[in-house]
Each structure stands twice: as C-alpha cells, then as structure tokens.
C-alpha cells in the first residue's frame, strides 16, 4: 500500500515539471495582424483595351498589366479592369513641334492626360481609387503567349517574375528599334497599327492612343485593404540575407539621367514586389527601401557616343509596418555588412539602353542605323536623274516622276511628294536635305542619354549580405 502511494506522489510531483518543459518547448503561436495598404505614389501598370481619341472627357477602359502588391500578397490581380477618362489636353514642347514640321507634319500635336478612378476586381467587387493625371507611354503592351515546353535548362537563380520582366523589356526595345515592326508582327491589332502608320504620314491628322498603350498611373491617395492575420513562423525570416545572385524587382523614387548625374549622388528605390526565400519564407516585404549611390555618370557626346550610368545599392530599410509586427530576427542575419546589389535590367526608354554584366546602363545604337544615310544618298542621286534628252519608247522625255517623288518624301514626307511635282530642282533639293538630315542625326549628332524617370521598374541582383535598420 505504501508503495502505491509513493508511486502516486512521485507521478503527481513530476507532472507539473513535465508540463512546464513541454509548454516551454512549444511557445504559443499567436497570429500577427498585418495592415495591408497601397501607399500614395505607387504606380499602377496599366494598358488600355480600346483606342482612345484625344478628346476631353473621353472614356478610357484599361486593364492591369502587372499585379499590385501589399506587404507579402497581391491585392489587385493582373487583368483587373479599371475605368477612367481623358481629363486634359496639353501641347507638345516647341522642339518636338518643330521636328514634326521639318518632317512634313503640320498637325497641332497634343498629349492626352488620363485619370483612372474605378477598378472592378475579378470577384465582382468595386474598388474606388484616385490616380494622378498621366500620359500614355511609348510602348504597346503585348499579352504573353503560352510557351511550349523546352528541354533546355534555365538558370535556377532567376525568379520567374524577374525573368518575365527582363523578357518584356527586351521585347519593348526590339519593337522600338524596329520602328514598330515587331509590334506589327506580334501585336494583336495589325489593322490599327497600319491605320496609325499611314495616318501619321499625312500633313494633318487626328490623334489617339492605340489599344494596348501602356500607362503608369500613380496613386494620388492610399488604398486601404484592411488587416490580415499571418502566422508568426511566416515572419521569422524578415530582414535576413536574401542570398547571393538573388534578383529582386524595384522602382526608383526620383529621376536619374546621365546628362546631369554626378558620382556620389544618392539614389533611392523601393521594392515593388516582396522577395521570398527558396522555401517561400518572406525575406523582404513590398515597400522595402533600398539606398544607393551613383558610381559612374558619363553624359552623351557627339558622333553618337551614348551616355553611361551606374549605381550600387548600399543599404536596405524595412518598411514601417514591420515595426508593428515585431518578428523574431533570425540569428543568421549579419548586420555589420552593407548591402551590395547592382542593376540587371531596367524599363528605360525602349531601344536606347543596354545593361552590361557590371551593372552599367549604356545608351546604345544599332549598326543598322547606317543604312538610313545610305538609302537617303541613293534617293538623293535618283532625284537628280531627270533623263534629260533621253527618249522613251513612246518618243517623249521621261520626267523621272518616281525619283523626284522619293526625293520629296525623303526630305519632307507626303508634303515633299506634292512639292516634287514642281521644278526638278525642288525635288533634288529636298532629296539632299533628307540626306543631310539623315547623316547628321545618324552619325554626327550626340548619342542618347540614359534616362531613368521616377517609378521606372528595375531588376537588381544582390551580392553581399544586407544591413537592415
């Protein structure tokens, strides 16, 4: 009997100790409340679905080309429909107007500013928002196509989002350098492309935004999506080292140009999408600030030598929402070393910028540009060949109508063709004017500058472990 009682007392005494050990090893897992909000100043990547005439109060319908993120999740999916309208018409700068007149276009050129206000989410909910007035970009959005499976292995270090971003920029550059021919071949509306091409050759023509024209509509006010609960274990990796050669997407927060930048100037950016680890742990949430400095700035020079620009990321700052979450910092974080990251690709002026392996953005020129002055020279010579004194099969002299027409078109567009019907000297003069302008603009003039406007999308590659603060 005494033995049974002793066993009972022993078990009763050990039970509290055993329970305390179990609960000490399994701390309470209380979900963390995270506030989701898209801040004012965030650009919405849109493209219009129908042609928009340059008329005030004209209705505009667009779709989101890219999703909108808040903290660690998508709050507005790609493909969401958004409505807006043309709010203002502004005249183009005088230099652009002068170049158009020199080319035979006498249209009072304008630009249409568009503001967006109502988005319809895929589940049918309506979202009211307000964007700043924005102009259409020079690129046309081409929806991606389903690709066949390939046996070629792709680099496992580049996330699919960054790879898609880089491919889209290469496509935009190819389209601009081919003067829209790539868009004509791959674009969904070839008839509209052809109409636009022919209409812009007229001395006076209406203006519109083509379907597919891209917009970066900047939010004028923040958009609140409420609070969500997140498990603490999903937040433990916040602020840790992303890993060498990991690529993230960001946008810059101010204009940068090789024309006026100086070595040592600061630059700031912000992650436009969260960065996850290989096991899908959140490392850097959307809104993480990146701080860097300009390390190379070289303006463009004559003889078509383009500008160069390079910057280096040196520090990382987590968004303020992280301070309210208070995640447990991982022991592997090295906070003594500054961040190191370099540029991989940028959404710059399409057809103008190339990024080398060292992260230097260079304004480049295609070698095929030399075909332009060569063709203009042949046209100029042909415009002078009036076949004086020669007889055709009908016994009359040939007026060289084709050569004179080409000379007029080379110098002054469709208006030059009409002027070439006059004295032969007019057509020859227009032909040589076109040759001179082609030689100057292609060979002699300054090269292009590297210009990154505010909110330009970029892909950066991390190097050494970052320092968060």
Image (tube, grey):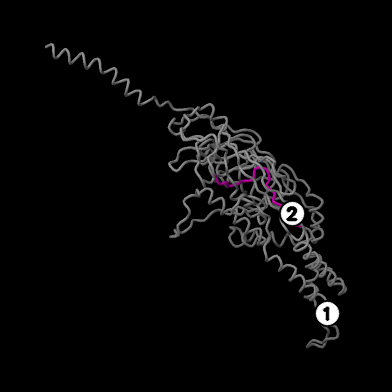
Magenta highlight on residue 457: yes
Q: Nearer the viewer, residue 463 or 85?
A: 463
Which residues make up the magenta segment? 446-462
Asked whether, in this view, residue 199 is left or right of residue 10, the answer is right
Q: Secondary structure at mark 1?
A: loop
Q: Is residue 266 above or below residue 388?
A: above
Where is the N terminus found, in terms of image quarters?
A: top left
In the displayed image of the protein, which residue is found farthest to the front? 336
Where is the C terminus found, in terms of image quarters?
A: top right
Magenta highlight on residue 213: no
According to the picture, the residue beneath numbered tag 2 turns out to be 300
Q: Secondary structure at mark 2?
A: loop
Q: Nearer the viewer, residue 435 or 339?
A: 339
Q: Quadrant of residue 395?
A: bottom right
Q: Which mark is residue 386?
A: 1
The answer to whether the residue labelled 1 contacts the one labelled 2, judged by CB atoms less than 8 Å apart, is no
In the rendered image, residue 413, in percent from the top left (x then y), is placed at 78, 65
């Amino acid at each position: 009997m005494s033995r049974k009682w002793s066993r009972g007392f022993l078990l009763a005494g050990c039970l509290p100790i055993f329970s305390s050990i179990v609960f000490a090893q399994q701390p309470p897992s209380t979900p963390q409340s995270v506030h989701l909000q898209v801040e004012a100043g965030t650009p919405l990547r849109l493209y219009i679905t129908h042609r928009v005439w340059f008329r005030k109060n004209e209705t505009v319908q667009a779709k989101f080309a890219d999703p909108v993120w808040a903290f660690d999740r998508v709050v507005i999916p790609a493909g969401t429909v958004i409505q807006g309208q043309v709010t203002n018409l502004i005249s183009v700068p005088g230099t652009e107007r002068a170049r158009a007149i020199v080319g035979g276009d006498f249209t009072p050129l304008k630009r249409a500013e568009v503001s967006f206000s109502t988005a319809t989410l895929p589940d049918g909910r309506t979202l009211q928002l307000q964007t700043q007035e924005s102009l259409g970009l020079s690129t046309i959005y081409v929806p991606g196509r389903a690709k066949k499976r390939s046996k070629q292995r792709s680099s496992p270090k580049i996330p699919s989002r960054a790879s898609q971003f880089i491919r889209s920029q290469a496509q935009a550059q190819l389209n601009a350098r081919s003067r829209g021919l790539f868009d004509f071949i791959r674009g969904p509306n070839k008839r509209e492309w052809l109409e636009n091409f022919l209409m812009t050759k007229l001395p006076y023509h209406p203006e519109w935004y083509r379907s597919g024209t891209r917009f970066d509509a900047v939010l004028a006010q923040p958009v609140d999506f409420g609070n969500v609960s997140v498990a603490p274990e999903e937040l433990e990796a916040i602020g840790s080292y992303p890993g060498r050669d990991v690529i993230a997407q960001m946008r810059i927060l101010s204009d940068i140009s090789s024309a006026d930048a100086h070595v040592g100037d600061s630059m700031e950016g912000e992650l436009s999408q969260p960065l996850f680890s290989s096991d899908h742990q959140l490392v850097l949430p959307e809104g993480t600030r990146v701080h860097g400095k300009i390390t190379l700035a070289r303006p463009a020079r004559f003889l078509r030598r383009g500008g160069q620009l390079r910057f280096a990321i040196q520090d990382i700052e987590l968004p303020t929402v992280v301070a309210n979450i208070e995640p447990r910092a991982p022991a592997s974080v090295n906070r003594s070393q500054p961040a190191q990251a370099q540029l991989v690709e940028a959404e710059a002026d399409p057809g103008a910028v190339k990024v080398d392996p060292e992260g230097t953005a260079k304004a480049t020129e295609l070698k095929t540009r030399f075909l332009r002055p060569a063709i203009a020279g042949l046209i100029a010579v042909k415009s002078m060949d009036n076949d004086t004194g020669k007889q055709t099969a009908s016994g009359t002299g040939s007026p060289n109508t084709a050569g004179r027409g080409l000379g007029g078109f080379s110098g002054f567009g469709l208006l030059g063709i009409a002027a070439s019907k006059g004295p032969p000297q007019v057509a020859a003069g227009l032909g040589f004017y076109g040759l001179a302008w082609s030689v100057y603009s292609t060979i002699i003039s300054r090269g292009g500058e590297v210009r990154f406007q505010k909110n330009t999308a970029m892909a950066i590659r991390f190097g050494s472990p970052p320092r968060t603060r």
